[in-house]
Image (spheres, helix red, strand yellow):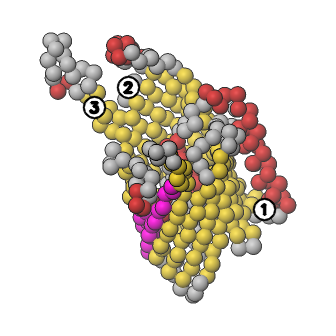
Amino acid sequence: MRLLLVGFLCLALSTFLNAQDSSNERDNTPKYSNEFMNIGVGARSFGMGFTAVSFVDDVTSGYWNPAGLNSMSSDHQLSLMHSSYFGGLANYDYAAFATSVDSQSKIAISIIRFAVDDIPDTRFLVDANGSINYDNIQFFSSADYGFLASYARELPFLGGLDFGGNVKVIHRTVGSFSKAWGFGFDAGVQKEINEWKLGMVVRDVFGTFNAWSHNSSEVEEIYALTGNDVPVNSVEITLPRMIIGGSRNFELTESLGLMASMDVDITFDGKRNTLVNSELVSLDPKVGIEADYKKMAFLRLGVNQFQQIKDFDGSTSWTFQPNMGVGIHFNELTIDYALTDIGNLAPGLFSHVFSIKVNFNVEN
């Protein structure tokens, strides 16, 4: 137990110190850099208010907490997910595969894509004669990609503590106009103590740096005419983020079970619109529950995204994002569905989320 606490504290201290080392750059650091990597994956976690770091135990651990890979119930798992945002304008897709290395370690590969496709390029709509020619309209995509390579291992000398890490590559494109490449690391731990599952993950442990390059020649002329600044090559920094969580299972009857979970996102990139915030750190809590019938059918509810909204009359009020989901597990197949932002309390975040998971070579 003492070793577990020491491990947690060391990882938390490392995150805090890295964030402090970046404090001089904070004023020039985008607060929501690489935010597409914080949307989440898997309809199960979406339905539970985006909680996961303590109980995740499948292929999606490669995203939520790589340490959870070591609790996979099968030798191999495949997961796919799709959702749309803003009335189908933006599409969010995820695919991952995980496999066992040996009895104490697992690996996984995950791919995330968030994109707005078929954006019209109207720069050449008006030809040299001053005539409008719709055939001159071309289309491009603004797409963000995340590639994760994950490794998890049980550490027997720390009382069976599960540890995992990610190496991640970021690629972002805006048609032929701009592109960026980034590189970073994540690390996480999980441990079960007295029927409680505890987890912690640190994303962008040392900061993730996106190197942007711009094809200025394509937009220089039109930007000059419209009075906009021509973009220049630059580096965008994503500061560390820490997520801690806890969960517990309850057996209500022989057939009915219940799990309650809570995660807290801790960010160090300045004051955010969260339930608890300051110039140094912001805390964003999330809670969820999952009821199951014989581990075959699931009903999920969750709440997250607590924010303070200012009305037109100057008054303020609190809002939040409620979510729900259902799932079914049959043999080696699991199908999950989630409806995020029930009642559309947070405009623009409403979405249907579908995901499937397939097990191969289930261990008995």
On the image, the x and y values in percent for residue 318 come to 53, 54
On the image, the x and y values in percent for residue 4 come to 80, 59
Does the CB distance between marks 2 and 1 fall below 8 Å? no
Q: Nearer the viewer, mark 2 or mark 1?
A: 2
Q: Is residue 118 magenta?
A: no
Judging depth in this view, the residue of 281 and 74 nearest the camera is: 281
**Which secondary structure, mark 3?**
strand
Residue under numbered circle 2: 176
Residue under numbered circle 1: 156
Residue under numbered circle 3: 120
Q: Is residue 5 left or right of residue 211?
A: right
Does the CB distance between marks 3 and 1 fall below 8 Å? no
**Which secondary structure, mark 2?**
loop
| Nearer-N-terminus badge (3/2) | 3
Q: Nearer the viewer, mark 3 or mark 2?
A: 3
**Which secondary structure, mark 1?**
helix
Residue 183 in view, yes or no: no
Distance (Cα) linking label 3 and label 1: 56 Å
60 versus 74 height, above or below: above
Q: Is residue 324 magenta?
A: yes
**Residue at the image point whose x is 46% and y is 76% from the top:** 297
Q: Which residues are magenta?
A: 319-339
* Majority secondary structure of magenta residues: strand
178 versus 345 height, above or below: above
Distance (Cα) linking label 2 and label 1: 50 Å
- Which residue ends up furthest to the front in the rendered image? 313
Classify the position of the N terminus by image quarter.
bottom right
Classify the position of the C terminus by image quarter.
bottom right
**Residue at the image point whose x is 39% and y is 15% from the top:** 227
Q: Is residue 246 left or right of residue 314?
A: right
| Nearer-N-terminus badge (2/1) | 1
